[in-house]
Amino acid sequence: MVDTIDKAKSKNGDRSKRKGGSEQYPEWMVSHKAAAYCDMTDTQWKHHRGMRPPPVGDKRSGFRYRRTDLDAWMELRRLGLWADWKQVRQAHGEQVAWAVMLKRLEKKRAEIDALAVEVS
């Protein structure tokens, strides 16, 4: 699993270290920072509303996105696991659906790691 993550980071570069390091992309980000972290414009980010990880917070204090959730979301999309997000969200609600998607990601990572062991 760690090897898969390391490969992705080496291929795409560790996003937390891009464009000024961790000060640029802190652990918790507001929408415009999260959009930049995901290499999207604000317009693209708004277009993906309902199709991205759930934010934490509320309107009064402001919504925030966790960097690890954004990384997981991008990996889910890359692996093709994000396609059934709407169906899972409708069945379970947003927060539970996010936990379900993270479990699916862990399962897929384990499958990839098992294949890597078989090949080597």
Image (cartoon, grey):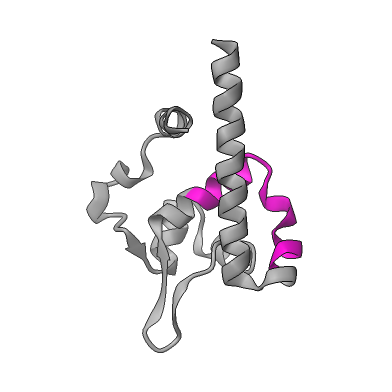
Observer-nearest of 12 and 95: 95
64 shown above or below 23: below
**Residue at screen point 36% across, 64% down:** 29
**Residue at screen point 43% across, 65% down:** 65
**Residue at screen point 76% across, 63% down:** 87
Can the viewer see residue 49? no
* Tally of marks: 0
Most distant residue in the top direction? 120
> How far from the left and from the top, in percent, is residue 94?
61, 71
Q: Quadrant of residue 24?
A: bottom left
Q: Main secondary structure of the magenta part?
A: helix
> How far from the left and from the top, in percent, is residue 115?
61, 22
Observer-nearest of 86 and 102: 102
Say if the magenta span includes residue 80: yes
**The C terminus - image quarter:** top right
> How far from the left and from the top, in percent, is residue 51?
64, 62
**Residue at screen point 54% across, 52% down:** 73
> How far from the left and from the top, in percent, is residue 16?
32, 46
Q: What segment carries the magenta color?
A: 72-89
Can the viewer see residue 61? yes
Observer-nearest of 54 and 99: 99
Q: Quadrant of residue 9?
A: top left
Observer-nearest of 32 and 88: 88
Say if the magenta span includes residue 48: no
